[in-house]
Image (spheres, grey):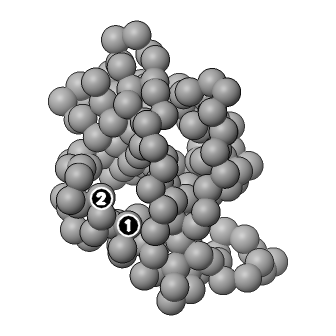
Amino acid sequence: MKTILIMRHGEAKPMQADDASRNLTEQGLQQAKDVGEWLKQYFEIDAALVSPFVRAQQTAEQVLALQTPKFVETCSDIVPSGSAHTAIDYLETLISMYPTYQTWILVAHMPIVSYLVDRLCPDTMPIFSTAAVAIIEYNEQTGRAEFTSMQLP
């Protein structure tokens, strides 16, 4: 059984012409740090997929500062307009390639974070507040997953 953590980035600065370049606010940085501290208590993150957008990269930096994942990759499939189907197919491929990695985190955006949960756990589409984390137990043998909880900052 694997654990998949799906996280929305921390609070970002207001919308700008270039959405991909938006930074986190001071509160967003603190949210990410607080969630990172909580995650450290309960999970040893082995691998991370992170959206290339600045606010997701900044969130991941705060979260992963307290851990040393063996695998970290910027993944353009998990941008706001990305395909959850493609992203989950890619994640499942990585899980099969790295069978010893038990805990995976994806740091992305609304609405794709909700779609990712629904793709793994049909009929479960939570709305994520900033820096929220969905916790999913995933059976790599059967491809079935169970949404267990949502952690808020």
Q: Residue at x 28, y 69 (%)?
A: 37
Q: CB atoms at circles 2 and 1 under 8 Å apart? A: yes
User: Mark 2 Cα within 10 Å, few/some/many (few <14, many 20+)?
Assistant: some
Outermost residue toward the bottom in this view: 26
Residue 2 x %, y %: 30, 30
Classify 44 as above or below 68.
Answer: above
- The residue lying at 34 percent from left, 42 percent from top is 104
Mark 1 lies on residue: 35
Q: Position of residue 60 (x, y in %)?
A: 41, 64
Report the residue at 59% width, 38% height from top.
116
Q: Is residue 25 left or right of residue 95?
A: right
Where does the image place residue 4, in percent across and percent down from the top left? 39, 39
Question: Which of the pair 24/153 is nearer the observer?
Answer: 153
Q: Amino acid at mark 1?
A: Val
Q: Secondary structure at mark 2?
A: helix
Eyeballing the image, is 133 above or below 62?
A: above
How far separated are the C-alphas under marks 2 and 1? 6 Å
Residue 118 seen from this side: yes
The kind of residue tagged 2 is Leu
Question: For the view shown, which residue lies furthest in the front direction?
Answer: 149
Q: Position of residue 35 (x, y in %)?
A: 38, 67
Image position of 50 (left or right of 121) = left
Mark 1 lies on a secondary structure that is helix
Q: Residue at x 30, y 64 (%)?
A: 38
* The quarter of the displayed image where residue 135 is located: top left
Q: For residue 39, which numbered disc appears in the image?
A: 2
